[in-house]
Image (tube, helix red, strand yellow):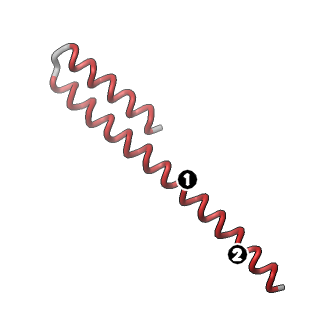
Amino acid sequence: MGTVEQMKGKLKEKAGDITDNPQWEEEGRQQAAKGAEDRRAAEERAKAQAHEKKSEFHEQKQKAAES
């Protein structure tokens, strides 16, 4: 989701540059930056979920060993 927002922002920024519209350029920069942060946040959430699953797996193995 963030990748699409980032690309849309870059396109808007370029359109602003071509049409000499500084407002579009700034909006595009901000939209692209937001998209990049959204993408990074999604990546970090996915990493955290993978670590949680790994932790759960080890906990199950520990309980099995204790039985």
Residue 37 position in % (x across, y down): 37, 46
- Residue drawn at point x = 70 percent, y = 75 percent: 59
- Give the spatial CA distance, label 2 vs label 1: 20 Å
Report which residue position mark 1 lands on: 46
Label 2 amino acid?
Glu
Horizontal and vertical percent position of residue 32: 33, 35
Secondary structure category for the residue under label 2: helix
Residue found at x 27% / y 18%:
15
Amino acid type assigned to the residue bearing label 1 in the image? Ala
Question: Relative to 9, is 62 on the left or the right?
Answer: right
Judge from the rendering whether residue 37 lies leftward or rightward of residue 67; answer left or right.
Answer: left
Residue 2 rendering spot, x and y as whole percentages: 43, 39
Q: Mark 2 or mark 1, which has the lower sequence index? A: 1
What residue appears at the point 17 percent right and 26 percent down from the top-left corner?
A: 23
Residue placed at 44% from the left, 31% from the top?
Answer: 4
Q: Quadrant of the C terminus?
A: bottom right
